[in-house]
Image: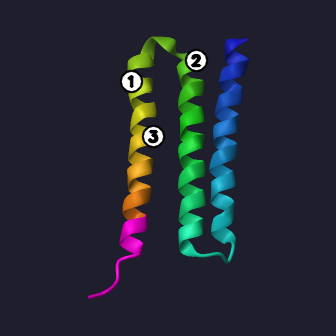
């Protein structure tokens, strides 16, 4: 049962990755594309790490550190990129 749940989490993560990549082909603004890509990439990566956590629970310290790093790094990077894109030339 744990293996099935693990595979489900990994597949959900892959679906989020492709779902976030799809808007890059559209004609919306760069910030919309960046936002959708970063949110879907973060959720997808976290789902994959949870799937790995279910498969190899003895590695939980590293995988939990990976989850925390994904959450913090991707959030901060999104804010930095948004801030840089709104800077006016002096």
Question: Does residue 55 sit above or below 14 in this rendering?
Answer: above
Q: Which of the marked residues, 1 or 3, is nearer the chain's N terminus? A: 1
For disc 3, the marked residue is: 71
The numbered mark, 2 or 3, whose residue comes first in the sequence reads 2
* Label disc, if present, on residue 62 of the rendered structure: 1
Q: Is residue 67 magenta?
A: no
The quarter holding residue 28 reads bottom right
Earlier-in-chain disc, 2 versus 1: 2
The residue stretch that appears in magenta: 82-90
Which of label 2 and label 3 is nearer to you? 3
Look at discs 1 and 3 and give the one toward the viewer. 3
Position in image of residue 72 (x %, y %): 40, 42
Dot 1 and dot 3 residues touching (CB under 8 Å): no
* Mark 2 to mark 1 CA distance (whole Å): 13 Å
Confirm or deny contact between disc 2 and disc 1 (CB under 8 A). no
Secondary structure, mark 3, is: helix
Horizontal and vertical percent position of residue 37: 57, 57
Task: Classify mark 2: helix, strand or loop.
Answer: helix
Separation (CA) of disc 2 from disc 3: 21 Å
Nearer to me, 74 or 13: 74
Q: State which quadrant residue 35 falls in.
A: bottom right
Which residue corresponds to mark 2?
55
Whether 45 is drawn above or below 60: the answer is: below
Q: Which mark is residue 29?
A: none
Instruction: Give x and y (percent) for residue 34.
Output: 53, 64
Query: How many residues crowd mark 1 within 10 Å: few (<14), some (14–19), many (20+)?
Result: few
* Left or right of 18, for residue 73: left
Q: Is residue 16 above or below residue 83?
A: above
Q: Is residue 77 left or right of residue 5?
A: left
């Amino acid at each position: 049962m744990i293996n099935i749940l693990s595979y489900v989490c990994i597949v959900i993560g892959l679906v989020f990755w492709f779902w976030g990549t799809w808007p890059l082909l559209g004609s919306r603004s760069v910030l919309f594309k960046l936002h959708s890509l970063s949110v879907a990439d973060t959720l997808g990566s976290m789902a994959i790490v949870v799937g790995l956590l279910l498969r190899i629970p003895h590695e939980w310290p590293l995988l939990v550190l990976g989850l925390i790093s994904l959450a913090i790094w991707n959030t901060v990077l999104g804010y930095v990129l948004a801030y840089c894109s709104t800077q006016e030339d002096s």
